Image (cartoon, helix red, strand yellow):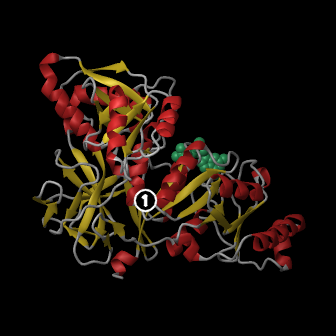
Amino acid sequence: MNPEIERRRTFAIISHPDAGKTTLTEKFLLFGGQIQVAGAVKSNKIRKTATSDWMEIEKQRGISVSTSVMEFDYKDYKVNILDTPGHQDFAEDTFRTLTAVDSCIIVVDGAKGVETQTRKLMEVCRMRNTPVIIFVNKMDREGRDPFDLLDELEQELQIGVRPLSWPINQGVKFKGVYNIYENELNLFTPDKQRVTEKVSVDVNSGYLDECIGAQDAKQLRDDLELVAGVYPEFDVETYRAAEVAPVFFGSALNNFGVQELLDCFVKIAPSPRPTKAEERDVNPDEPKFSGFIFKITANIDPNHRSCIAFCKVCSGKFVRNQPYLHVRNGKTIRFSSPTQFMAQRKSTIDEAWAGDIVGLPDNGVFKIGDTLTEGEKIHFRGLPSFSPELFKYIENDDPMKAKQLEKGINQLMDEGVAQLFVNQFNGRKIIGTVGQLQFEVIQYRLENEYNAKCRWEPVHLYKACWIESGDEAELENFKKRKYQYMAKDREGRDVFLADSGYVLQMAQEDFKNIKFHFTSEF
Ligand code: GDP
């Protein structure tokens, strides 16, 4: 493989809010020399607010596109970290970001174990066969027994685990981690700012007893023996095949266990992997450029009303000012100011390789999932839309602005803010989202960016599911029977709007030849 591509590591750090994602990201940037002191990276996390006030959240989030991708060189590697919002109302945003990564690091709070959001994110990783490494954080706090935690990770995340580092005691007695991968001991000297020193020590030597005391030394030896007995030898191929997740213990805040994680990560994490297009698999090593848009960020600051489309380079080399084919609309586009991102700034770039993320200024020509190539008509498959969880009718609140509203809704849907369904019975538009916040986001943005006013009206729905059947007659019969609950999505596909779990279950039982799908890709 081209060495430029081979050395790239494009990944996301994901976690349930508060597990320590921001802290860990920051420590990585510290090691990468992107920032000099901890505390410099602004969290895109949303602090818990009593109200779900969109403006307040926006202020906190700072809609800062510059933290969407952070890239730095570490040793011989080029590391691209993709940032994901922690707030669950923006889960779709996170899911889409996961389509652009080659691997993930999952941060778990050692005291809390696996939490809801961790579980959901892991589901997406599993769907896409994304290799994951787990970092069990906050070992400086009283937590749970590491073996229990490993069992929980295995069960809850449905993946084999293999510890590659091991904590020596925890909480106030936390003494450090033994690096199983490198056979080294890293003693704990709490230091929030600098990198700590490592000690090389044979676990069976008396020196270990000197370092950590006889009791902890015995415990460590017993634990390591058990680890070796219970877990199979670490095999990097099972990790890359997404069958086994290596587990590291540490404390991001105290910069402990972090370098072990990063050092091992760059060595074992996959370099850019082939990307599936509808027509064929695209290899990163192919000479010609191709890429897809996985995220569009609008800048809500009225003084800088611009969007940035984030393009993942899937193959070859992206070059500034080259003509590229926008496959969906058949037009050729040149980009004169593509950007790349570093901790707190972005800069114009001349080229980018497979694995990199390029920011493209967008004035409404892109939709999530759009493909760019040097001319070949291929279509990358993005992440399917998930069946939304909340539904509302969207109504025009200013009759003079119907056109603006229509345009605004269409563009926001292109950006992937929410999903639109049109009820075939009454022609009314229904917006489906994964979180309450998105309704506020839509209303706010329609008003501020499109000068249109919308109003929400309740609609009582339980689930929207895409239906299909090889049995045309049965499908027609179903649509007739359920005509009040049939809708079309933006691609014109049939969607059944079930108003209760019971109704859905009955429908599934009564119409055995119809398949009910809960994601839009099948
Ligand atoms: P995120 O929501 O996952 O990005 O979490 P943050 O990185 O913002 O961390 C949440 C809180 O946990 C912050 O108050 C951190 O200071 C704290 N925290 C992070 N890592 C550690 C750790 O290793 N030990 C302890 N005790 N606290 C930590």
For the point 20% across and 67% down, which residue is it? 350
Residue 480's place in the image compared with 387, above or below, is above
Quarter residue 79 falls in:
bottom left
**Mark 1 crowd level (few <14, some 14–19, many ≥20, 10 Å Cα):** many
Q: What x and y, as percent, mark residue 37? A: 49, 55
Q: Which residue is mark 1?
A: 81
User: The N terminus appears in which quarter of the rendering?
Assistant: bottom left
Q: Residue furthest front?
A: 473
Kindly tell me whether residue 58 is visible in this rendering: no
The one nearer the camera, 492 or 345, is 492
For the point 70% across and 47% down, which residue is it? 111
Left or right: where 33 falls relative to 182: left
For the point 22% across and 74% down, which residue is it? 288
Q: What x and y, as percent, mark residue 33? A: 44, 64
Q: What x and y, as percent, mark residue 151? A: 72, 57
Residue 122's place in the image compared with 446, above or below, is below
Kindly tell me whether residue 325 is visible in this rendering: yes
Residue 115's place in the image compared with 277, above or below, is above
Left or right: where 262 falls relative to 64: right
Q: How many marks overall?
A: 1
Left or right: where 273 falls relative to 365: right
